[in-house]
Amino acid sequence: MVLFGQLVVGPPGAGKTTYCTGMQQLLTVLKRPRVVVNLDPANDALPYECNIDIRELVNVEDVMTELNLGPNGGLVYAMEYIEVNLDWLIVKLRALTQDDAVPYVLFDCPGQVELYTHHDIMTRITQQLVKALDLRLVVVHLVDSTLCVDAYRYISAVLLSLSAMMQLELPHVNVLSKIDMLMDHNDDLAFTLDYYSGVYDLSHLLLTLHTNDHPMSQKFKELNKLMAGLVEDYGLVTFEPLDIQDKECAMRVLSRCDTANGHIMNAEKINDPSDPVSGVRLFQTGFSADTEPMSEYLERYEERYRARMQEAEEEEDPGGFLSSLG
């Protein structure tokens, strides 16, 4: 039986666990069978319904205590222990997905980026899972969109995404998460959000670095130019903007993932008595989402965001009392 899934990765604070929570809720609404796996042996605060928790096999706290290792060393040891005992995870996944027509698995991964960019442990684990379970995986690489405010951090995030793509050797959907946090700070961006999403000509971004007075701008001028050139030479990195609280945003990312891992080709197998053509509609969404320019899509999102904020304010002040005081 073929399994489909998402490997959710990204640096600490990018919103991986929040993403898994929101995606689990979305799949539930769509009546799609799903299994959520916590693959982070250091994560003991799980807001979502966890079907398989790797901490039952090994957790970082015990490793640090028994082997006198630090947090990073303990995590690397724990991940290597998982690889050696991967049959434990494979057996549990088979048991949970054997009765589903189109099983879908979400893997919530650790936040240490070295596991995806320097160490090959995650590559080895995913390769074994793919082979043992006939698992069709897509990597969802989350990057905090607030990094766009700082050009240096943005270029670093793009390089991180490119490095993970090369290291993991799987289809990728790179995501700019928490775009709702940028809506009130558009003036802090040198360009519009669709520029950062598309990773367009980075020479324009370099100009903003070279014209400021920061001492690092001149010192690392050539380095910045070379890094931007490297990203553009590969031409692989683009980002999908995401506000996980916005249904259309979440659906758009899901359709991207389903297209990348092949799940969309099995849409007709999704059984939803209340909406017999729901699978076909998602199939059509996956192939039609690219027709709308990103700038127009983000404009529509901002309208929905403003409406949502207005509704929240009205709920907090239903009688208009606070407004009258102003």
Image (cartoon, grey):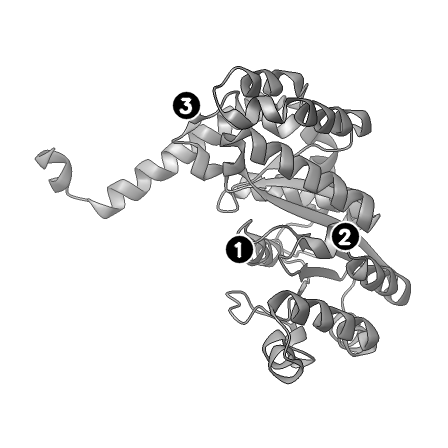
**Residue tagged by mark 1?**
18
Give the amino acid at mark 1. Thr
Q: Position of residue 49 (x, y in %)?
A: 56, 69
In this rendering, the label closer to the viewer, 3 or 1: 3
Give the amino acid at mark 3. Asp
Q: Position of residue 158 (x, y in %)?
A: 67, 35
- Name the side, left or right, on which 312 lies relative to 196: left
Q: Quadrant of residue 251?
A: top right
Could you give the CA–CA distance between mark 2 and mark 3, rounded to whole angstroms? 36 Å
Extreme-left residue of the structure: 325
In this rendering, the label closer to the viewer, 2 or 3: 2
Q: Which is nearer the N-term, disc 3 or disc 1?
A: 1
Q: Residue at x 81, y 25 (%)?
A: 233
Q: Position of residue 230 (x, y in %)?
A: 77, 28
**Residue tagged by mark 2?**
118
Local crowd size for mark 3, using a 10 Å CA cut-off: few (<14), some (14–19), many (≥20) = few
Local crowd size for mark 2, using a 10 Å CA cut-off: few (<14), some (14–19), many (≥20) = few
In the image, residue 151 above or below residue 178: above
In the image, residue 82 above or below residue 161: below
Give the amino acid at mark 2. His
Q: Which is nearer the N-term, disc 2 or disc 3?
A: 2
Q: Residue at x 66, y 21 (%)?
A: 202
- Name the side, left or right, on which 277 lies relative to 294: right
Could you give the CA–CA distance between mark 2 and mark 1, rounded to whole angstroms? 25 Å
Q: Nearer the viewer, residue 48 or 285?
A: 48
**Residue tagged by mark 3?**
187
